[in-house]
Amino acid sequence: MSATASRVRGLIAPALATLIAFAILVSLGAWQLRRLEWKEGLLSRMQARIHTAPVPVPAPARWSQLRPVDYEYLRVTARGVFEHAHEMLVFHAGGSGVLEPGWLVMTPLLLPSGERIIVNRGFVPTALGDAARRASGQIAGETDVTGLMRAPEPRNPFTPADQPDKRVMYVKDPAAIATALRLEGVAPFLMDADATPLPGGWPKGGQTTMSIPNNHFSYALTWFGLAITLLVVFGFFAAKRLRG
């Protein structure tokens, strides 16, 4: 076997490894482009829904059929009675005009049908976590609530454990809140209440996060760039090996 043939033979394994890595990098780039298309669709729906006139919240008979893609950020209105005795607090690090950590006040809204919707009434500072310190903002009797429908917030490996005995949660999950409060007939979605002035000023509504990161295009360019770089590096490596 000639020296050149031996060098070519020695490139087979590196070439196969390079092709496999190249295929993986290209597939990751293509996946990010699909994610980009999905994210742009989500942002488009969000902008269209948050600026429309509110519609009545879906009837309880439809709740089991709802998908987040069908209702996320839909502006709705509901009428019921706030069950302040079942209020739950969700930790909030800040955002939407809030510069300090505190709580989001999650309160069940009892509908005339007997079902409930967990309503994110808004933000209160840490010192006002105790409802007795903001009693004037605890709306009594039947009331109308307008806001945005939201899907349950997922947990991640870094989410702290909830403290239901202290009425403290770390994700906005209506099912978890219903379990902690031992409530039945709770909607599988949430409502983020609009920023409506309340006696005493608290809670402050309108805490929906409107800015959603959309970096998928730059991620795709990164993966495609790494794929091209890999081919260039292999080209230099192969040329050097063939020259001996």
Image: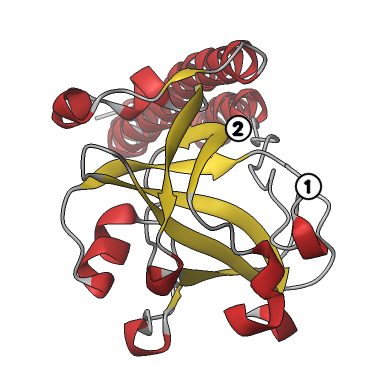
In which quadrant is the N terminus drawn?
A: top left
- Amino acid at the residue labelled 2: Tyr
Query: To which residue does mark 1 refer?
Result: 197
Q: Nearer the viewer, mark 2 or mark 1?
A: 1
Looking at the image, can residue 45 be seen? yes
Residue 147, above or below 128: above
Q: Alpha-carbon neighbours of circle 1 within 10 Å: few (<14), some, or many (≥20)?
A: few
| Front residue of this view, candidates 243 and 139 | 139
Residue at the spot x=73%, y=63% of the render? Answer: 202
- Amino acid at the residue labelled 1: Pro
Q: Alpha-carbon neighbours of circle 2 within 10 Å: few (<14), some, or many (≥20)?
A: some
Residue 41, above or below 129: above
Residue at the spot x=43%, y=30% of the render? Answer: 28
Q: Callout 2: helix, strand or loop?
A: helix
Q: CA distance from mark 2 to mark 1?
A: 42 Å
**In x, y percent, where is residue 219?**
60, 32
Query: To which residue does mark 2 refer?
Result: 219
* Residue 87 occupies quadrant: bottom left
